[in-house]
Image (cartoon, helix red, strand yellow):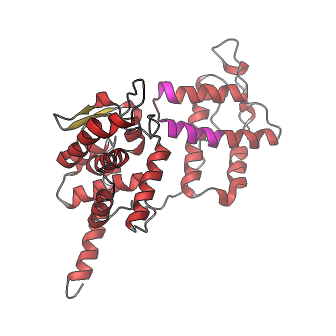
C-alpha cells in the first residue's frame, strides 16, 4: 500500500519541495540541527541518492508516492551488494528521512516503518598486541619533521583513543600540554576532556616546538597535524601514513586508524581500567557501546588460559 499525500494548504515546504530538494534539506538538517558527523551525513547521502535513482527509474516522482513495497524492492535489488550492516544503515537512513518528510508535511505516513532491521553479527573489534603497538610507535624517524609529526600522531591515538576524524580536526587551542590533556569535540559536537599521558605529551611537544614549525608555511593554520605542504592532514592521509608504518613493521593485520582506538580501549581494560572511565575517554554516549571491549578482554583471558594452563 502506497503512502498517500497529505493535503497541505500552506507550509514551509511540504508539496513544493522536489525529491532532490527535500533530500538536500534533510542533509542540512542532519549536519546543522542534529550535529551528525560529516562521515555519517555522507553515508546517509550515498544511501538515499541510490534510493532516489532507483525510485525515479520506476517512474516515481514524488516522495509521497513511495510505499513500503518500493523500499523492500530497492533493498532486494541491491542484493549481495549490501552486507547486513549496510542494509541496516540504509534502513536507518530511510526511516530518518521519511520521519523528516512527515515533519515537513510532505508525506502522510513513513513507508519505512515496519521493515525489520537485519540481525547483525556480534563482531568483536580487532586490535593490536602490545608488542605490535610498541613496534609501530618506535618506527617513525623522530630526527625529521615528518617523523616527529607521525610519532606524535601515533602516540596520541594510542594514548587517548581518539577517532581519526577527531585527530584530523584537532586544533592547537584544544591542546593543553602543561595540564596533559586535550579538549575534544566528538560525535554530536559533545565536548570531553581526554588525558594524554607523558609519552604522548612529550612526542606532541617535540613536534609542536620543532617539526611543525618547519612544516608550517606562510599564514596561520589552526590544525595540529599538517602535511608536507603545511595544510591540514586529512583522514585519508592519516590512514595512509598508519598503513605505511604497519607494512614497514611487518604487521600483517589490515590496520586502520580505528584499530589503534580499539587497541587503546582493550589494553586499558586488560590493565584494570573501569568501564565508566573508559566510556568518558572514548566519548561513547551509551555504556553498552563500551561494554563490547569487555568481551575482547574475556576472549584474551580465555586464550591465555588455553595456552598456559596444563589442562586448558
Foreground: 94 or 21? 21
Q: Is residue 40 magenta?
A: yes
Quadrant occupied by the N terminus: top right
- The secondary structure that most of the magenta stretch takes on is helix
Foreground: 136 or 276? 136
187, above or below 79, in the image: above
Q: Position of residue 215 (x, y in %)?
A: 39, 37
User: What residue lies at 51% left-to-right and 40% top-to-bottom?
Assistant: 39
Q: Is residue 18 left or right of residue 232?
A: right
Q: Position of residue 310 (x, y in %)?
A: 19, 88
Q: Which residues are magenta?
A: 31-48
Q: Position of residue 51 (x, y in %)?
A: 69, 42
189, above or below 88, in the image: above
Q: Residue furthest right?
A: 59
Q: Is residue 10 left or right of residue 273?
A: right
Q: Residue furthest top?
A: 10
Amino acid at each position: 500500500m502506497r503512502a498517500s499525500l497529505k493535503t497541505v494548504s500552506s507550509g514551509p515546504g511540504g508539496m513544493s519541495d522536489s525529491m532532490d530538494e527535500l533530500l538536500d534539506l534533510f542533509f542540512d538538517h542532519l549536519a546543522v540541527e542534529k550535529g551528525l558527523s560529516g562521515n555519517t551525513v555522507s553515508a546517509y547521502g550515498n544511501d538515499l541518492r541510490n534510493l532516489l535513482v532507483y525510485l525515479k527509474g520506476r517512474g516515481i516522482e514524488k516522495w509521497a508516492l513511495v510505499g513500503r513495497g518500493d523500499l523492500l524492492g530497492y533493498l532486494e535489488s541491491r542484493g549481495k551488494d549490501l552486507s547486513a550492516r549496510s542494509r541496516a544503515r540504509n534502513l536507518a537512513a530511510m526511516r530518518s528521512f521519511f520521519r523528516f518528510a512527515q515533519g515537513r508535511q510532505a508525506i502522510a505516513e513513513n513507508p519505512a516503518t515496519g521493515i525489520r532491521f537485519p540481525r547483525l553479527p556480534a563482531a568483536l573489534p580487532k586490535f593490536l598486541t602490545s608488542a605490535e603497538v610498541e613496534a609501530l610507535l618506535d618506527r617513525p624517524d623522530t630526527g625529521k619533521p615528518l617523523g616527529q609529526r607521525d610519532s606524535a600522531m601515533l602516540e596520541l591515538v594510542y594514548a587517548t583513543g581518539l577517532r581519526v576524524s577527531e585527530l584530523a580536526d584537532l586544533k592547537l587551542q584544544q591542546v593543553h600540554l602543561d595540564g596533559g590533556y586535550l579538549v575534544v569535540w566528538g560525535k554530536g559536537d559533545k565536548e570531553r576532556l581526554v588525558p594524554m599521558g607523558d609519552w604522548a605529551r612529550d612526542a606532541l611537544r617535540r613536534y609542536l616546538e620543532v617539526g611543525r614549525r618547519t612544516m608550517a608555511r606562510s599564514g596561520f593554520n589552526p590544525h595540529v597535524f599538517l602535511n608536507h605542504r603545511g595544510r591540514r592532514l586529512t583522514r585519508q592521509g592519516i590512514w595512509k601514513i598508519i598503513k605505511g608504518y604497519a607494512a614497514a613493521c611487518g604487521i600483517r593485520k589490515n590496520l586502520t586508524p580505528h584499530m589503534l582506538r580499539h587497541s587503546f580501549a582493550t589494553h586499558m581494560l586488560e590493565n584494570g581500567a573501569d568501564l565508566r572511565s573508559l566510556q568518558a575517554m572514548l566519548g561513547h554516549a551509551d555504556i553498552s557501546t563500551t561494554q563490547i571491549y569487555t568481551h575482547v578482554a574475556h576472549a584474551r583471558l580465555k586464550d591465555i588460559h588455553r595456552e598456559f594452563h596444563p589442562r586448558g
